[in-house]
Amino acid sequence: DTEVTQTPKHLVMGMTNKKSLKCEQHMGHRAMYWYKQKAKKPPELMFVYSYEKLSINESVPSRFSPECPNSSLLNLHLHALQPEDSALYLCASSLGQGAEAFFGQGTRLTVV
Amino acid sequence: QQQVKQSPQSLIVQKGGISIINCAYENTAFDYFPWYQQFPGKGPALLIAIRPDVSEKKEGRFTISFNKSAKQFSLHIMDSQPGDSATYFCAASEDGFGNEKLTFGTGTRLTIIP
């Protein structure tokens, strides 16, 4: 199983809503990531979890809050987002230490 | 500060031809260089990757050439097919516990025409 599963696939939310994105992998990977991707741009790293601990936060606004409940799950909690936060949010995982990263299909988020 | 520069931005190649995409990096601590293929509406998928201890790696129609002294690497797609039409991203990362982040190039939109 080399799959990273993200839910939901699409999400529309208002600026006052609270929502969560979910990511799951069962490959035994110890590093998990959140990326944000705008149209025609490369993925931008947001957060890295290594062994369930937050190891990298790329100065992401506090309206994005990551959570790693266990080694297989990664959540991204969203609150008070802005329209400019609309993007494809990608989850990825890797064995760690620069090993190959597997990406999920992404959640297409629209903030209205 | 962009640490991985990718060119060209877009590329049109005839079916059966060779597609070549180039990347250059600045950080000499990078030691892992993957290429990702992304179709519209999908997440990036790892295509092929190389480490600096080899100068070339081939997997089927895809080849990475790596020049450590020049800090450059490139992707060659032989016998390009319409199904190869996608956006390609080069990337680089440093080895080391807790520092597994990928730095992506800006992407190349490849179109294979019949």
Image: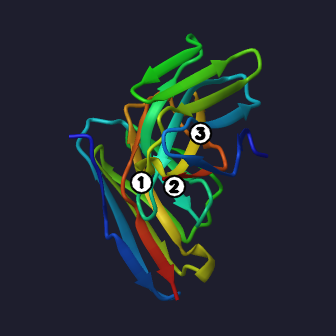
Amino acid beneath label 2? Tyr
Q: Nearer the viewer, residue B74 or B25?
A: B74
Q: Residue furthest left?
A: A1
Local SS, label 1: strand
* Above or below, comparing residue B43 to residue A65 in the picture: above
- CB atoms of marks 1 and 2 within 8 Å: yes
Give the number of the mark in front: 3 or 2. 3
Asked whether, in this view, residue B81 is left or right of residue B103, the answer is left
Q: CA distance from mark 1 to mark 2?
A: 6 Å
Q: CA distance from mark 3 to mark 2?
A: 16 Å
Amino acid beneath label 1? Cys
Residue marked by disc 2: A35
Give the number of the mark in front: 1 or 3. 3
Q: In percent of the image, x 38 and y 71: which residue is there?
A: A20
Q: Earlier in the sequence, mark 1 or mark 2?
A: 2
Residue marked by disc 3: B90
Q: Residues within 10 Å of mark 3 (few under 14, many from 20)?
A: many
Q: CA distance from mark 1 to mark 3?
A: 18 Å
Residue B34 image position (x, y, % from top left):
52, 33
* Above or below, comparing residue B26 to residue A90 in the picture: above
Asked whether, in this view, residue B3 is left or right of residue A59, the answer is right
Residue marked by disc 1: A91
